[in-house]
Amino acid sequence: MQHIDPSKNKTEKSKIPYYSIFGVIFLVFLFVFLWKPLNSARVAYIPLNKTMEKQGKEAKLPAVIGNASVEIIQDQPNLTDAESIDQPIPEDEVVKDELDEAFESKDSGPTYYTIAKGDTLTGILSQAGVNRNDVYQLTKQFKQLANLRVGQQISWVVDENKSLQVFNWYISARDTMVYQREGDAFAQYTEKREGNWQAFTISGQIDNNFIAEARNSGLTLNEILSITKILQWQLDFRRLKKGDRFTVSLLREMIGSRHSTSRILGVRIQNNRRDYYAILADDGNYYDVNGMGLARSFLRYPLAKQAKISSSFNPRRLHPVTGRIAPHNGVDFAVSRGTPVLATGDGEVVIAKSSGSAGNFITIRHGRQYTTRYMHLDKILVRQGQRVRKGDLIGLSGNTGRSTGPHLHYELRIDNKPVNPMTSSLPQAEGLTGKSKSAYLELVKGIKPILAFPSEIKAPIVNNQSNNTLSAD
C-alpha cells in the first residue's frame, strides 16, 4: 500500500492557484505586448479614402511603407497646437449677433474700464485677455498701480497677439499716467490734459435696433457697449422693439469739439413700457433706483457639492487622448456618470445638443459678457431657448464625445475669451446699505429728472395774470 504524505499533497495543491495567477498575468502581458508594436515610429497611419472604402480589403494601399506595420484609421482632424480638440465642431458655436460683432470690432482701439469695489489691475487685464506676461511685467515695474481707486478710469491698447502696448491711468480730470511699451519693458510718462468735462444727455427711440438708433442719437460705440454691459442682466438688448426708448446721462472730456473719454452717469431704457434704470454710485458700481445691485451672482461650481478636479484650466495642456499640445479651456470634475449638473448663473440656453468631441453639451448665455459650457453629458435636460436660473438642474454628467472616462468639463467665457472658472472674478449681486444707500438715494432724486424722456418734459406754464413762470413735472 502506497504511503501518501498529507503534508506534501497539501503543498502541491496550494501551489495550483499561484500558477494560475501567474499564467493569467503572463497572458495579459503578452496580449498588451503584441497589441501595439515596440517601435511606434514604424507605424504608418494611412487615411481611409473613398476609393478604399468602395474596394474593401482588396484595395491597394496608397503608399509604399517598406517593412513597417500598417494601421488604417479614419482621417484625423488637422489641428494646430493652438486649437483645442475638447470642443464642439465650429458649426455648433454660439451664433453671433450685432452686439457680439460690435464688441469684436472695438478690439483695434482703446478699451476703457471704470474701477469698481474689489477690482485688481491683474484681474481686470487678465479677464480682458491681455498677455499675462505683460500684466506681470507692468505691475512688477510700477508698484503704484496697486493704488487704483474706485471710480477712476483706465484704458489700454493691445496688438493682434493681445500684447499690451499702452496702458493709461486717468488719475484725475487733468492728469494721466501713460505706460508705453518699449522693448520688453514699459516706460512711464505723465500727460497733462487740457480738456474740460462736460455733461450731456442723449435720448433716442428704437426703430430698427439699439446699436443703430444709439449711434444715430450721438452715442459712440464704446459708450453703447458700456451701456449694454451695465444693463446686461436686466435686459436682452436683442429683444428691444420698435417704440422702445432710452435716455443716457454722461460726462465727456472735450478737447475742442472732440472728446476722447466718457463716463456714463445714468441710463434709463423703457421696454414694453417698463423702465430699467442704472445709476453710477460713489463706489464705481451701478445700481437701480432703490440701491439694489444690477449684477447677478454666479455659482463657482456647476455641481451640488465640490468634486475632485481631474484636469485644471491650462492653455498649454498635453491632451490625454491625442498626446498633442492643445488648450484645455475649462476644468474637468471627476464625477461618476449621472451626477446632476447645475446652471452656474441665470441665463438662456443657446445650445443643447451633441457635437464633435464635446459629446452632449450645453451652452448658456448669461447677460452679454458671460457664457458657460457643460460637456460630455450623459443626458441633456434643457432645450435651446429655455431660460434657466442659477442652480437649476440642466443635465447629468457622462462620458460622451472624446473622453477618457466619466467626468464633467466646465468652461466660463468672458467676452468670448476662456478664463479659469475657479479663480476668475465673478459678478456679485450686492446692494447698498446704511449711509451709502441714503447718499445714493439722494443722488437718484437729482438724476431721475435728467433721465426723463422728451415727451415727459412739459413746457413751462406761463400765468399771464401774475407773469410768473412755473415748471410742471
Image: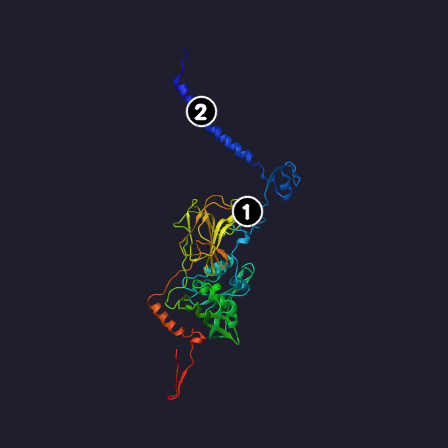
The percent position of residue 366, horizontal first and vertical second, equals 45, 58
Quadrant location of the N terminus in the rendered image: top left
Q: Left of 434 or right of it: where is 201?
A: right
Q: Quadrant of residue 43?
A: top right
Q: Residue 405 or 25: which is nearer the viewer?
A: 405
- Residue 229 can be seen, yes or no: yes
Under mark 1, the amino acid is Arg
Q: Left of 219 or right of it: where is 300?
A: left
Q: Residue 452 or 240: which is nearer the viewer?
A: 240
Residue 136's disc number: none
Q: Mark 1 sits on what residue?
A: 324
Quadrant location of the C terminus in the rendered image: bottom left
**Element at label 2:** helix
Q: Is residue 360 above or below residue 244?
A: above
Q: Mark 2 sits on what residue?
A: 16
- Residue 173 can be seen, yes or no: no
The percent position of residue 97, horizontal first and vertical second, equals 52, 61
